[in-house]
Amino acid sequence: MSLEPLLLRLDRIAGGRQAGVEISDANRTHPRTRRAFTWIIWLLVVELLIGVGAVVVALVLAAEGEPVPLAVWMRTIVVLGMTATLFYFAWRAARGWRWAYLRLRLFAQIFPVITLVMAAIPGLYPLWMVTEQIVFSLIMIGIADFLTSDHMRAMFRDPAIDAHA
């Protein structure tokens, strides 16, 4: 049983008007495109490990009787959920779906800003979590760098622009 019809429905919700727009197989399988997505997936794996590590630290602290602020628990849940979403976007973008590339690029550019602003609020998070957020942001900036490269922007260029040229 193929999950693709279900995934296409999910894509329609997540992708909106761009949901059905695919890049060419040549662009999708270009060695530089494939290499970029390999790096992106590995960076997301590191993000996931950092997120799981934050949960483990919070659990250990709580088990030792240390107070763990609600903001820390919320942050860990949000990071894990967000990372799962980014994996989905990266997977669909690597399969050639333009909407997923656009979402992944947008979030990779916005999340570091939000994370760094949150880390800068005095007293909101303990030092270990502020450090985690800074590392998280640096990795997301790396992902954004891959996605905003000239090559990737050219590979995922809007086909409507090419049709009007």
Image (cartoon, rainbow, N blue to C red):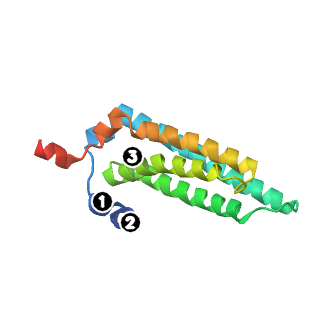
- Circle 3 residue: 94
Task: Kindly give the residue lying farthest to the left in the view shown.
Answer: 164
* Disc 2: CA contacts within 10 A as few (<14), some (14-19) or many (>=20): few
Marked residue nearer the N-terminal end (1 or 2): 2
- Circle 1 residue: 19
Q: Residue at x 27, y 61 (%)?
A: 17
Q: Quarter of the image for the N terminus: give it.
A: bottom left
The reply to whether callout 1 and callout 2 are in contact (CB within 8 Å) is no
Q: Is residue 61 left or right of residue 102?
A: right
Task: Kindly give the residue lying farthest to the right in the view shown.
Answer: 64
Residue 100 vs 147, above or below: the answer is: below
Disc 3 marks which amino acid? Answer: Ala
Label 1 vs label 3, nearer the camera: 1
- Residue 104 placed where, x, y %? 43, 50
Alpha-carbon distance for marks 3 and 2? 16 Å
- Residue 148 placed where, x, y %? 39, 39
Disc 1 marks which amino acid? Answer: Ala
Q: Residue at x 43, y 37 (%)?
A: 146
- Circle 2 residue: 10
- Residue 18 placed where, x, y %? 28, 57
